[in-house]
Image (cartoon, grey):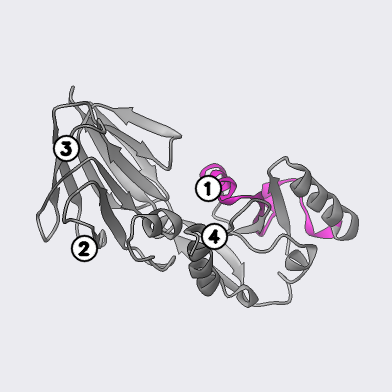
Amino acid sequence: MKLFPFFWETKKCTDLLASVQEERKDLLVDDIQDADMILAWGWDGWMLHAMRQYSDHNLPFFGLHCGTLWFLTNKDCLSCIEQLASQEIELITIHSLDTTLVDSWWTHIEWFARNDLVVWGNVFDYSHFAISTDMQMQVSGTWLVISTALWSTAYAANLGTPIIPLHSTLWSISGIATGEYKYSFVSPDDQDIDIDIQSRSLVSVALDGYNTIHHNIKKIQLRPGTHTARLAFLSSEQFAERRLLLAEKKLGR
């Protein structure tokens, strides 16, 4: 097993890298072309950054936790790396949320999100969202959040929606200040989804947090993701169970 290291430059991460270089340097390669797996040291956001940068190489991502919560990574220890060769590995395919944003000038913006798409306007105003699914939903509110399984752990849990299993292709649609409407689930494998937005104030859309923001959006077209990535976990990590426990911890329960 050859690993290409991609690490967040904090003391904790650099110390761990130094330990691996000292004790198991044979596992690391300097050229990603020689690697069997990408070794990402950092926090969950760093894993997202690694997937953005290296997904084209079609290699699995094995994350080591160097942050606070660790929804997408394994434990931060040298033994985890050594166990890669001897333990069974669980590979989970991550599906993106592909989108076309249409602004008020009818400019079409093609982009994709791995975790979520957030729509918001003026906090003192309501927007009307006409969501074209098999249910033809009409939702009025301040914010709308469309989450993939990747990001439903913390975000959707805070919004009161169930956590989607990480291997699922389902999306959750949830609202903030949307009255009786709480959430729903849609399957992008079966349909494309259009969201027409009517609002007195400007509406903005953020993809994957606040790294990519587009303003004055009038229409959103969502379709099944074509940008996939694979996350690797040691089977002994019992990732699915730990993910639920960490969500409860984040919510202070």
Q: Which residues are magenta?
A: 25-54
**Of callouts 2 and 1, which one flags the residue occurring earlier in the amino acid sequence?**
1
Rendering coords of residue 77 (x, y %): 76, 62
Closer to the camera, 61 or 79? 79
Which residue is denoted by mark 1 in the rendering?
48
Q: In x, y percent, where is residue 45?
A: 55, 46
Label for residue 71? Answer: 4
**Foreground disc of the pair 2, 3:** 3
Is residue 110 depicted above or below 228 in this figure?
A: above
Residue 182 figure quarter: bottom left
Which quadrant is home to the N terminus?
bottom right
Q: Residues within 10 Å of mark 4 (few under 14, many from 20)?
A: many
The residue positioned 79% from the left and 59% from the top of the image is: 27
- What's the distance in space between the residues labelled 4 and 3, CA to CA? 32 Å
Real-space Cα separation, disc 4 to disc 2, in angstroms: 28 Å
Amino acid type indicated by mark 2: Asp
Given the image, on which type of amino acid does mark 4 rest? Phe
Label 2 SS: loop
Q: Indicate which disc, 4 or 1, sits on the residue closer to the N terminus.
A: 1
Q: Position of residue 131 (x, y in %)?
A: 15, 49
Q: Earlier in the sequence, mark 4 or mark 2?
A: 4
Please determine whether, in this image, residue 108 is positioned above or below residue 24: above
Identify the residue under disc 2.
190
Considering the numbered disc 4 on the image, is that residue within a helix, a strand or a loop?
Answer: loop
According to the picture, the residue beneath numbered tag 3 turns out to be 127
